[in-house]
């Protein structure tokens, strides 16, 4: 039992020596010029940036500036459209002629009277055209405050019953500037329009 302390001291000293030895070996490996053969085989390419000067190309000629024309282009003439044309006319024969006239007996130039804006020619009735019948029809109606036509009726047509329907239908498409009294538009009753039907 007396030798156990000696063994213990010997074991401690040996273990300290081993630890110190391992420490020194590790230190020498880290601090020394030890190169792993695998790492030695890996060669890193040297990247060297060459000293080059970047030259800006300033010799390219710039395009000439486009000069403004001395004279402006000529103005185009505006196309005049006939707003009075009835686009729904299907049966107007080239040899027929329809005359439209307004009875101006109710107009007074000093009152801001109603004025026609749109007048539409009637369709020449096919039956009258094929038989060579000419004539006229007077239609009476009311011009409303909006300039539209209300209550048109044929009052005098020759020959009777031939041009009535076409004349009334055409008058419904008329547009007027309404009569103005004291700044307010008013209706005008008893306005008459004469449609004359002639064959050339």
Image (spheres, rainbow, N blue to C red):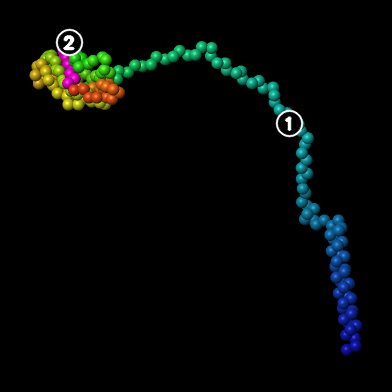
Kind of element beneath mark 2: loop
Q: What stretch is highlighted in magenta?
A: 190-199
From the image, tell me which residue sits under label 1: 54
> Could you say where residue 92 lies in the image, as x and y percent from the top left?
20, 18
* 157 or 17, nearer to the observer: 157
Residue 196 counted in the magenta span? yes
From the image, tell me which residue sits under label 2: 200
Query: Considering the image in quadrants, where does the C terminus appear?
Result: top left
Which of the two discs, 2 and 1, sits closer to the camera? 2
- In which quarter of the view is residue 170 placed? top left
* 111 or 171, nearer to the observer: 111
Q: How crowded is mark 1: few (under 14 residues within 10 Å), some or many (20 or more)?
A: few
The single residue placed furthest to the front in the displayed view is 182
The single residue placed furthest to the left in the displayed view is 160
* 9 or 170, nearer to the observer: 170
- In which quarter of the view is residue 12 placed? bottom right
Identify which residue is drawn at 29% across, 20% down: 83
Q: Residues within 10 Å of mark 2 (few under 14, many from 20)?
A: few
Measured Cα–Cα span from mark 2 to mark 1: 90 Å
Identify which residue is drawn at 16% across, 12% down: 199
Q: Can residue 88 be spotted in the picture? A: no
- In which quarter of the view is residue 76 placed? top left
> Could you say where residue 130 lies in the image, as x and y percent from the top left?
13, 17
- Disc with the residue nearer the chain's start (2 vs 1): 1
The single residue placed furthest to the top in the displayed view is 200
**Relative vertical location of residue 84 with respect to residue 1 in this rendering, above or below:** above
């Amino acid at each position: 039992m007396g030798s156990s302390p000696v063994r213990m001291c010997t074991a401690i000293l040996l273990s300290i020596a081993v630890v110190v030895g391992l420490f020194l070996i590790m230190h020498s490996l880290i601090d020394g010029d030890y190169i792993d053969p695998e790492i030695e085989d890996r060669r890193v390419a040297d990247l060297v940036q060459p000293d080059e000067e970047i030259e800006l190309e300033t010799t390219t000629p710039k395009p000439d500036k486009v000069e403004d024309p001395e004279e402006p282009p000529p103005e185009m003439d505006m196309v005049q459209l006939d707003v009075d044309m009835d686009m729904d006319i299907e049966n107007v024969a080239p040899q027929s002629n329809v005359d439209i006239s307004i009875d101006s007996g109710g107009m007074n130039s000093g009152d801001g009277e109603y004025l026609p804006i749109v007048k539409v020619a009637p369709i020449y009735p096919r039956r009258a055209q094929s038989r060579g019948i000419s004539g006229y029809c007077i239609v009476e109606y009311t011009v409303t405050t909006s300039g539209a036509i209300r209550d048109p009726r044929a009052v005098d047509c020759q020959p009777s019953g031939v041009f009535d329907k076409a004349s009334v239908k055409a008058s419904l498409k008329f547009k007027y500037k309404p009569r103005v009294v004291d700044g307010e538009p008013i209706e005008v009753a008893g306005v008459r329009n004469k449609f004359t039907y002639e064959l050339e």
